[in-house]
Amino acid sequence: MYRRKSVAVTLVFLSLISHDLIAEQSDDAALIQHRSQHIYNAVFGLPAVASRPVQTREWQVSLEHSNQFMGGVADDERLLIDGETSELVVRHRQRLGACVQLEVTFPFIQHSEGSFDDTIDDWHKVFGLPDAQRDTSPFFSLNYSYESADGVAPDVDRPQSGIGDVQLAIQRSLGCRATSDATAAEPIVRFGVKLPTGSVSELRGSGEFDLFVDYQSPVLTFGNRWKSGAAIGLLYVGDSPRFARQNTIVSYGTLGVQFVLSNRWRLLAQLDLHTPFYNSNLRELGDPAVSMSGGVRFLGPADQSIELTISEDAAIDTTPDIVARLAWTYRLPAGR
């Protein structure tokens, strides 16, 4: 089921609201907090990029929906990923001091047959994109399965839903003095842990603790409209007996850019990559994963923002065919 497909990064959409520019708030963040990993990678603790420092407290609710169709056979390995997965994520961030903040990430995950197979197939036909012979397989089916000579991973062939693996993280603004607030001018270092709270048999977690550490650059400004940022990190993957041929260390990175359309609107584009989670001859599992994303952020009153982004696999079959993410963020105003 291999395919070749040109990358289509779509810049989209609208929402509602606005706010004055504050260096600490997410309107100045050039990076998108999506994960966009296929199902046998997403069970591990690769985090979304860190948020810029918050003044007091912040809540974010996001919905990320992916359509996945990939797989193949290589030596003793056999993989099929065909279905749709939704991830509803609630994030809470709270300032613990002038330079330090805590983040808790709570995901709810659903695997389903989905409803967008024919739409995506039509999209490929309209733009002349290869579709991995998607139209030769039954639409709206669910089959996540992987096996090798080392064992059979958990598989899903009927709808499942429940909580995923919770993440806890502490981040510190480097160069920040304890007597002053952190600002966008400072880089960030973050330490975190993924807890084994999700079901392994239903592919909502790995059943093990994972640890991560990463570094994010300050927001870099070019003229009055362009901003950019980058992040690099390492993930220590807990050894799960249910997933064979794991790599213990996975490195990851992000590069993003933001264009200021107006006081309220931002355009976003981003490149995400990570090294393989598996020592595998299948490119879906054994090649570095690369995705490209684009979208819009709309700033609103009462310290709110809404963003919509879409991502695709820049390295073929290493991430889902397409992922749409909608996020609403509310931060408590300073002094409350």
Image (tube, grey):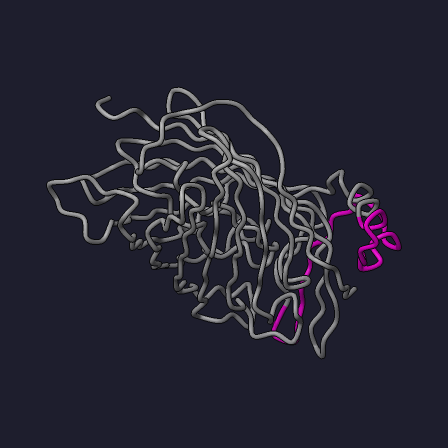
Horizontal side, residue 336 vs residue 11: left or right: left
Identity of the residue drawn at 76% across and 64% down: 4
From the image, which quarter does the N terminus lie in? bottom right
Q: Nearer the viewer, residue 290 or 110?
A: 290
Outermost front residue: 223
254 in relation to 122, above or below: below
The image position of residue 106, as x and y in percent, is 44, 39
Q: Nearer the viewer, residue 323 or 261?
A: 261
Identity of the residue drawn at 51% across and 46% down: 34
The image position of residue 45, as x and y in percent, is 45, 55
What are the residue bounds of the magenta stretch? 124-151
Name the quadrant containing residue 326.
top right
Identity of the residue drawn at 69% across and 73% down: 77
Horizontal side, residue 46 vs residue 174: left or right: right
248 in relation to 184, above or below: below
84 in relation to 319, above or below: above
Name the quadrant containing residue 80.
bottom right
Outermost right residue: 136
Q: Nearer the viewer, residue 287 or 150?
A: 287
Outermost left residue: 179
Horizontal side, residue 71 vs residue 213: left or right: right
From the image, which quarter does the C terminus lie in? top left
Identity of the residue drawn at 29% across and 24% down: 333
87 in relation to 222, above or below: above
The image position of residue 27, as x and y in percent, is 41, 36
The image position of residue 137, as x and y in percent, is 85, 53
Q: Is residue 322 magenta?
A: no
